[in-house]
């Protein structure tokens, strides 16, 4: 919003007058001039002018979003609601209109250049003196904010405080700094809502105490940050947090890649052992049963079975043998005839 | 014609007289009437229409509403030797217009008096208290994230507040208020608007903040690495546990099976160990003998004995 505005009615700081007392000298001068010109109806003209002035300065309208405050000889007389009203002519009663339902906005540490769907803000650095403040851990923070308010009590607004705007601005700066001064830099960056609500309560209290007749609608902290030279190091912290998480995820990834596989492998080892066990026992049982069966028959005819088994084995073994030497123990000096080494080499 | 001139002249005189007799006091004003520069009667504090003796008496207007004072930011050291720039503001009222008229007369002079008095009171309070007293307002527990503060800051921050921002401002007001009273001025309140470090200190503070953050960043990175190693360790341990448990279980299973088999074999073969040896040895002969095998047999052996003789022995 505009303070030294294009529209007088929107400007709450100028005490707009209903009308100035007319300049008597000028009127008289006019009359004299008319007289000299030999006009005989001068008095009539005066009467008409006077009548017009009285009518025009006596009738006034108050818009729907405002109230009219009437002062009679400077003294507060009454407050009038929206509509058409009459008062005593200027000089006796003066009218000041106050917009009571309009929500005004004051910005700190930033300025809206052009409000709209995409609001443009003026560069913050120009208003750094408004937004730079100390935190409770003696660091510096940049805290821009806006304060929205309405005129709550037109009487107080007009008469109790001379410079309402600077009172509001000074109070806001003081209260925001006091609240931020009790918080650490981390809290200032992350806890904007909390700060805004505390500021709202304290600022309203301060405004009530100073009788400016304003009522806060909203206090909003914009993006809080650390001063520009410090920002890269704060970003580095955020980056480090990301890095930390990434490292942990990578490690977890490796874990998840290996452990379930090895669980399966373990299961396999156990199953294989179970297989081995089954195999071993079954074979043992089989072997034992076979032996027992054989043994049963063997015990009925030991000698002949032995002979049979022996010979059957020999029948298999003998034909397979490569070289067979049959030696008579009575024969002497056989060994020199056998060149074992040579035979092997000859193979 | 003549009548008209007379009427106009009379009218002119009446109006002029009226204007120099009647005066209007607005809601925001108060008036001291002076006669030849000297105050006459009680000051007019209520708004409305008033009259005075024309030409001799003069109406001097003073503001009645709350006025503001905004000092120039002043630089001063705190008790702990930190140079800060301090911006104060105050609100005041002319409560005794007569005294005001007699002592300071104009508002600009009053502002100058406020400049001096508030500034000296501010200096008194600020230089005799550490910085933290003017920054903090209560002993509210602050959340100090991951910062490893240097000892000095830690000490400053942890120490309970003796006065606090609002109390310091109030004490400044208490010092200044009686001094302003003699000028017919009531100092309604004094507040600290802005406290900032002076530029050189600011730079040091920025460097400290950067160092703090760097160290936090390092801590996070290190934590990440540590956590990663921990997870790797867990992974290795878990792996070893799983494989070794599986091995143990497998060995147990196989051992039990071996024992069972042994028992079964023993039970069976114990019937005739010699016979067991006999058939198994024969089986081994069958399996192990091949073309490469040389065998020398004596004709005295059981197998070859028939080669030399066939008679029943």
Image (cartoon, coloured by chain):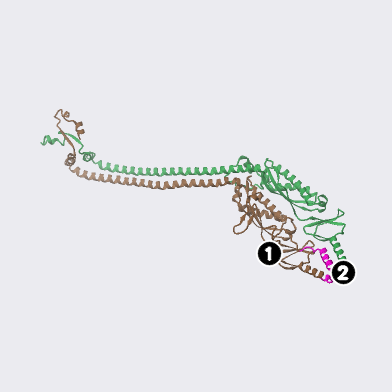
Chain colours: A brown, B green
Q: Which chain is home to disc 1? A: A
In the image, taking residue B250 as reference, residue B150 lies left or right, namely right
Location of the N terminus of chain A by quadrant is: bottom right
Residue assigned mark 1:
A65
Residue assigned mark 2:
B4
- Given this view, does label 1 or label 2 mark the residue nearer the observer? 2
Residue B300 visible to an observer of this rendering: no
Find the residue positioned furthest to the left: B311
Label 2 crowd bin: few (<14), some (14–19), many (20+), radius 10 Å:
few
- In reply to whether residue B282 is colored magenta, the answer given is no
Location of the C terminus of chain A by quadrant is: top left
Say if mark 1 contacts mark 2, CB within 8 Å: no
- How far across and how far down the image is residue A148, in percent? 66, 57
Identify whether B47 is placed above or below B151: below
Residue B257 visible to an observer of this rendering: yes
Q: Which residues are magenta?
A: A19-44
């Amino acid at each position: 919003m505009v303070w030294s505005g294009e529209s007088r009615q929107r400007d709450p700081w100028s005490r707009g007058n209903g009308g100035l007392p007319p300049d008597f000298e000028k009127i008289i001068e006019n009359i004299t001039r008319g007289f000299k010109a030999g006009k005989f109806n001068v008095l009539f003209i005066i009467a008409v002018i006077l009548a017009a002035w009285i009518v025009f300065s006596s009738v006034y309208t108050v818009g729907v979003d405002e109230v009219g405050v009437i002062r009679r000889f400077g003294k507060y007389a009454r407050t009038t609601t929206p509509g058409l009203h009459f008062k005593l002519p200027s000089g006796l009663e003066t009218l000041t209109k106050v917009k009571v339902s309009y929500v005004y906005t004051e910005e700190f540490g930033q300025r809206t250049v052009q409000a709209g769907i995409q609001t443009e803000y003026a560069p913050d650095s120009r208003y750094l003196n408004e937004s730079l403040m100390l935190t409770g851990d003696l660091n510096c923070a940049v805290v821009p904010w806006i304060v929205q308010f309405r005129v709550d009590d037109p009487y107080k607004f007009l008469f109790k405080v001379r410079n309402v705007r600077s009172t509001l601005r000074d109070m806001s700066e003081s209260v925001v700094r006091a609240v931020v001064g009790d918080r650490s830099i981390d809290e200032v960056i992350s806890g904007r809502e909390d700060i805004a609500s505390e500021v709202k309560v304290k600022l309203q209290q301060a405004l009530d105490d100073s009788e400016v007749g304003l009522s806060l609608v909203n206090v909003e902290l914009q993006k809080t940050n650390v001063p520009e030279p410090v920002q890269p190091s704060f970003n580095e912290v955020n980056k480090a947090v990301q890095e930390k998480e990434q490292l942990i995820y990578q490690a977890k990834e490796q874990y998840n890649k290996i452990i379930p596989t090895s669980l399966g492998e373990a299961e396999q080892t156990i199953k294989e052992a179970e297989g081995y066990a089954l195999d071993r026992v079954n074979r043992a049982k089989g072997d034992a049963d076979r032996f027992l069966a054989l043994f049963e028959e063997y015990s009925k005819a030991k000698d002949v079975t032995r002979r049979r088994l022996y010979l059957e084995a020999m029948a298999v073994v003998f034909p397979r043998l490569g070289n067979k030497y049959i030696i008579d123990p009575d024969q002497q000096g056989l060994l020199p005839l056998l060149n074992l080494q040579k035979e092997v080499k000859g193979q | 014609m003549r009548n008209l001139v007379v009427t106009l002249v009379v009218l002119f005189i009446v109006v002029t007289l009226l204007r120099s007799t009647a005066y209007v006091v607005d809601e925001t004003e108060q008036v001291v009437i002076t006669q030849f520069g000297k105050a006459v009667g009680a000051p007019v504090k209520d708004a409305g229409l008033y009259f005075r003796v024309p030409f001799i008496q003069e109406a001097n207007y003073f503001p009645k509403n709350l006025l503001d004072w905004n000092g120039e930011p002043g630089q001063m050291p705190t008790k702990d030797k930190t140079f800060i720039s301090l911006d104060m503001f105050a609100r005041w009222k002319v409560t005794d217009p007569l005294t005001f008229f007699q002592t300071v007369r104009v508002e600009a002079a009053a502002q100058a008096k406020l400049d001096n008095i508030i500034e000296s009171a501010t200096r008194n309070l600020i230089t005799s208290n550490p910085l933290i007293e003017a920054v903090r307002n209560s002993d509210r527990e602050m959340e100090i994230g991951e910062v490893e503060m240097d000892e000095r800051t830690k000490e400053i921050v942890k120490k309970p507040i003796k006065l606090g921002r609002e109390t310091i401002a109030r004490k400044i007001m208490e010092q200044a208020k009686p001094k302003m009273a003699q000028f017919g001025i009531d100092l309604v309140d004094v507040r600290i608007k802005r406290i900032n470090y002076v530029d050189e200190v600011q730079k040091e503070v920025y460097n400290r903040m950067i160092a703090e953050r760097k160290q936090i960043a390092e801590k996070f990175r290190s934590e990440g690495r540590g956590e990663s190693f921990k997870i790797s360790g867990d992974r290795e341990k878990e792996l070893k546990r799983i494989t070794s448990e599986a091995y143990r279980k497998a060995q147990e299973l196989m051992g039990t099976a071996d024992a069972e088999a042994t028992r079964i074999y023993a039970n069976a073969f114990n019937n005739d160990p010699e016979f067991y040896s006999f058939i198994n040895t024969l089986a081994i002969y069958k399996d192990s003998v091949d073309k490469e095998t040389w065998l020398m047999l004596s004709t005295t052996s059981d197998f070859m004995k028939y080669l030399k003789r066939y008679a029943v022995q």
